[in-house]
Image (cartoon, helix red, strand yellow):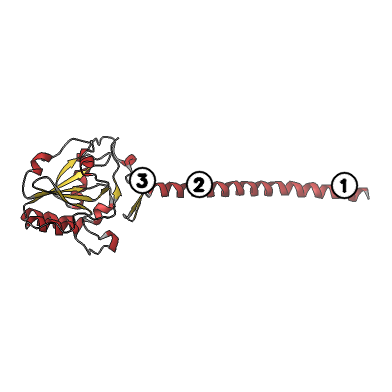
Amino acid sequence: MTAMKRCGKGDSSGRQRHRRPFLLFLLVLVVFATTAVAGGAAGAADSLKGDSIDRCGNPKAVSFPLQNRPASFQSEAVVRPGEKQLAKEGKGTVYFFLGSLCPCTDAHKHSIMELMSLAPKKNIKLVAVFPNKGESVELIEHFFKGIGFKLDYIVDSTNRLVKKFGARKTPEVFLVDEKGRVVYSGPIDDSVENLGQIKNAYLKNAVLELAEGRPVTVPRAEGSGCWIVRNR
């Protein structure tokens, strides 16, 4: 009887010794799984924060990953040629407010390039304005080279033109006549709202009407874009 009790105690102790490593393994597994889930949730949250532009049409508060820009990029003053010189030449001037990191600017690439060909023939000047915080000559030149634009441009580092025209998004355009009056303001066209198809070429129509001496039939339109990140 005594021997059986001792044997029983020995068996129970052995089972406990074998059970401890297994319980420790389960504990480690639970901790690892919890950490992985938390890390995944944090990663998803960071991803959502980084995804600051929703299909161009629904931009979030901050549209540009400024932290990814090289520290050497610094905003400059007016770049070739000066704003006053541009505004006094031709029948009018189109001011394109663009963003070098804005996908909605890329989405209007073909419309802008068509206007680059059309407007000079109609004696209309085209000027690109880069108003966002962190824009620079180096960044813009790199953007132009990649997208194929050949435009005079202004780095609006003080946001003077943003305030003057009341620009809010990129791309957003302002067509100014030879007397300095804004005859059209709004999007380049409505392609973003129509899945890439242009139903209303607002700017092109306004340019043609101004060049032919006719009143602009649609002086203002609403459209989507990336919110301008002002310099403060």
Q: Is mark 3 on a helix, strand or loop?
A: loop
In the rendered image of this protein, does residue 187 appear above or below residue 65? below
- How far separated are the C-alphas under marks 2 and 1? 50 Å
| Res 222 quadrant in image | bottom left
Q: In the drawing, does residue 138 fall left or right of residue 41?
A: left
Of tags 2 and 1, the one toward the viewer is 2
Going from N to C along the chain, the mark reached first, 2 or 1, is: 1
Residue type indicated by callout 2: Gly
Residue type indicated by callout 3: Ala
Residue 61's tag is 3
Going from N to C along the chain, the mark reached first, 3 or 2, is: 2
In the rendered image of this protein, does residue 66 appear above or below residue 216? above
| Res 160 quadrant in image | top left
Say which residue label 2 marks. 39
Residue 58 spot, x, y in % from top left: 34, 53
Of tags 3 and 1, the one toward the viewer is 3
Q: Is mark 1 on a helix, strand or loop?
A: helix
Residue neighbourhood size for the residue with mark 3, other residues' Cα within 10 Å, grouped as few (<14), some (14–19), many (≥20): few
Say which residue label 1 marks. 6
Residue 95 spot, x, y in % from top left: 17, 47
- How far separated are the C-alphas under marks 3 and 2? 25 Å
Could you tell me which residue is drawn at 11 percent across and 58 percent down? 209
Please identify the residue farthest to the right as the structure is shown.
1
Pick whichever, 12 or 65, lies toward us.
65
Residue 114 spot, x, y in % from top left: 14, 58
